[in-house]
Amino acid sequence: MTNIHYLIVYQPGAERVPASVFFVDDSAGTVHGLYFGAAGSGTSDEAYFRMEVAAGSVGRFLECDNPEDPAYRVDRAGDRRRRLPPLSPADAAVFVQLRSYRQTWWTFEEDDHVRMHARRVGTMSSVGSELCARSSGFDDRVLDLIRRHWSLGGF
């Protein structure tokens, strides 16, 4: 399995995940990710993205709602008027892998509530009234690049 990086914030009293990000990056400078939470759009939902990174800056930051979408819907880094590329089979495969991995942490219930898997809760650290999980080797540099284009309000 590809090395998946993650950062998760969980509110056990409310059974909510206000924010989480899962991503994989390759040596070519492409980051594929899955974000859940208040990303500055006024909604809390999953969004998938492909970020193309070169020399510390983001050339493209393409977003879609789910891996079954035929094409990306937004380029958060570039000119929104240019034609956005379709999802490639490789993009869709990585997004399915990320969703499957996210489901090893929690499953969705009604009203944005989640059912966090009990074995995962035990691995999380307490921060005030919230629990947090962060993968070892989590790449803060990549998170900073993501934040340049999404507010990531839950973090």
Image (cartoon, helix red, strand yellow):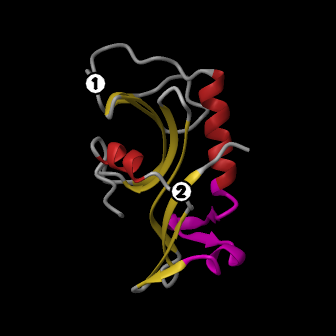
Type of the residue with mark 2: Gly
Crowd around label 2: few <14 · some 14–19 · many ≥20 (10 Å): few
Q: Are marks 2 and 1 in contact (CB under 8 Å)?
A: no
Residue 84 is left or right of residue 120, and the answer is left
For the image shown, how many numbered marks are present on the structure?
Answer: 2
Q: How far apart are marks 2 and 1 (CA)?
A: 29 Å
Report if residue 116 lies within the magenta region: yes
Q: Image quadrant for the C terminus?
A: bottom left
Q: Where is residue 68 in the image (x, y as percent from the top left)?
A: 61, 32
Residue at 32% of width from left, 34% of height from top?
Answer: 56
Range of residues picked out in magenta: 102-124
Residue reaching furthest top? 83
Q: Where is residue 76 in the image (x, y as percent from the top left)?
A: 31, 33
Residue at 71% of width from left, 76% of height from top?
Answer: 119
Residue at 63% of width from left, 72% of height from top?
Answer: 116
Q: Residue 137 carries which label?
A: 2
The mark nearer the N terminus, 2 or 1, is: 1
Type of the residue with mark 1: Gly
Q: Which mark is residue 78?
A: 1
Between label 2 and label 1, give the one nearer the viewer: 2
Residue 53 quadrant: top left
Along the line of sight, the residue nearer the viewer: 84 or 136:
136
Residue 120 is left or right of residue 125, and the answer is right
